[in-house]
């Protein structure tokens, strides 16, 4: 997107990734690419991110704990859902409120490689979070007076759904 002239704010969870990404952007001549940290489990990071002046939120955060559900500690499975499902929705809610108050046209895109809803997912919390997010979002868009757009068919395992607000 930055190569196409769009201003992009790329976020990384951990600060050690900021400098290498900034250096890569500089090497590519992408002065329109800004790199920030965003840990979805940090409420201060979420508040700061929601202050960004953007009109497209591309949400691709995620972690993965694989293995049979019966072997994964429940706390790790819960953390998967927190980071892959609930925190991206929480982040988007702040933008939705801001955009609605200013009557600004905007878009949220959720992208996941955590499984596809039209195929049975193998066991494990990691592969169940993508379909969980997809099942919640169309209703959220409808109830916020947004117009949901059907997910665009893409090559597996990537899945995305966009919502025009």
Image (cartoon, rainbow, N blue to C red):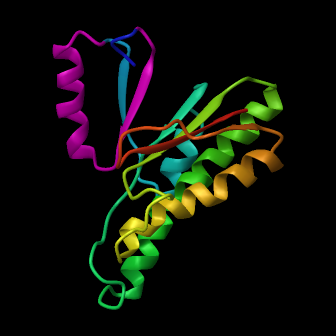
Residue 28: x and y in percent read 20, 13
Q: Quadrant of the C terminus?
A: top right
Q: How many marks?
A: 0
Relative to 80, is 113 above or below? above
Q: Going by the image, does 32 lie left or right of 58?
A: left
Where residue 158 sits, quadrant-wise, is top left
Res 21 → quadrant: top left
Residue 163 versus residue 123: which sits nearer the camera?
A: 123
When asked about the image quadrant of residue 37, the answer is top left
Using residue 83 as the reference point, say whether residue 28 is left or right of it: left
Asked whether, in this view, residue 101 is left or right of residue 85, the answer is right
Towards the viewer: 92 or 49: 92
Residue occupying image coordinates x 42% and y 38%: 154
> Which residue is depicted at the point 36% across and 40% down?
155
- Coordinates of residue 163 in the picture (x, y in percent): 65, 37
Q: In which quadrant will I find the N terminus?
A: top left
Residue 24 among those drawn in magenta? yes
Magenta stretch holds residue 20: yes
User: Is 131 situated above or below 149?
Assistant: below
Query: What is the x, y in percent for residue 57?
Result: 54, 34
Q: Which residues are magenta?
A: 5-30
Q: Residue placed at 83% from the left, 40% from the top?
A: 145
Nearer the observer, 142 or 55: 142
**Residue 140 seen in the current view:** yes
Image coordinates of residue 15 in percent, x first then y, are: 27, 45
* Name of the residue lying farthest toward the front: 119
Residue farthest to the bottom?
70
Q: Is residue 41 visible?
A: no
130 to the left or right of 122: right
Residue at x 37%, y 68% (from the top left corner): 126
């Amino acid at each position: 997107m930055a190569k196409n002239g769009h201003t992009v704010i790329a976020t990384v969870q951990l600060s050690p990734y900021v400098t290498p990404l900034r250096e890569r952007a500089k090497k590519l001549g992408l002065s329109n690419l800004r790199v920030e940290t965003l840990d979805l489990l940090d409420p201060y990071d979420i508040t700061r991110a929601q202050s960004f002046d953007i009109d497209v939120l591309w949400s691709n955060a995620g972690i993965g704990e694989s293995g049979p559900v019966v072997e994964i500690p429940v706390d790790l499975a819960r953390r998967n859902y927190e980071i892959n499902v609930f925190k991206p929705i929480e982040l988007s809610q702040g933008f939705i409120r801001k955009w609605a108050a200013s009557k600004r046209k905007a878009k949220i895109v959720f992208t996941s490689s955590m499984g596809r809803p039209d195929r049975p997912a193998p066991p494990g919390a990691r592969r169940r979070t993508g379909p969980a997010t997809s099942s919640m979002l169309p209703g959220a868009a409808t109830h916020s007076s947004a117009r949901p757009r059907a997910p665009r068919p893409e090559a597996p395992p990537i899945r995305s759904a966009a919502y025009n607000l």
